[in-house]
Image (cartoon, helix red, strand yellow):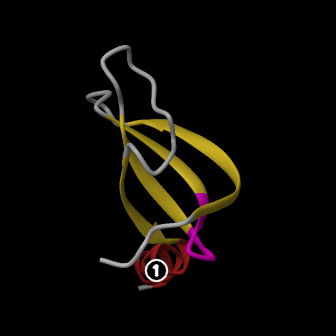
Amino acid sequence: MDEIKLDGAMVTLGTDLNRKFAWCLRKVNGVDCICLHERIAGGSSFFNEKDFITAIPLERVESCADLLIRG
């Protein structure tokens, strides 16, 4: 796996229904993404490389949403 570099400003998006994961918008290796982070026992997340799970490029989400809406 390539090295992950979380850079730029970050906007938190909240959590999932089970409050197991935390979501945010930020750049990953220079690409705008929705990031998924693990939450610690107290319910918060560091939103850093330590608790980072994966990232989905916003471009992919936008194109899928476009197909769904205009499909």
Q: Residues within 10 Å of mark 1 (few under 14, many from 20)?
A: few
Quadrant position of residue 15 = top left
- Report x, y in % for residue 69: 47, 75
Residue drawn at point x = 63 percent, y = 77 percent: 30
Q: Is residue 34 above or below residue 42?
A: below
Q: Is residue 47 above or below residue 35?
A: above
Residue drawn at point x = 46 percent, y = 68 percent: 4
Residue drawn at point x = 45 percent, y = 31 percent: 45
| Chain part drawn in magenta | 26-32
Residue drawn at point x = 43 percent, y = 84 percent: 67
Toward the front, the furthest residue is: 3
Q: Which residue is mark 1?
A: 60
Q: Quadrant of the C terminus?
A: bottom left
The verdict on residue 27 being magenta is: yes
Would residue 65 be found to the left or right of residue 12 on screen? left
Q: Secondary structure at mark 1?
A: helix
- Report x, y in % for residue 41: 30, 18
Q: Main secondary structure of the magenta part?
A: strand
The verdict on residue 29 being magenta is: yes
Q: Nearer the viewer, residue 17 or 29?
A: 29
Specify the amino acid type for callout 1: Arg
- Report x, y in % for residue 5: 54, 66
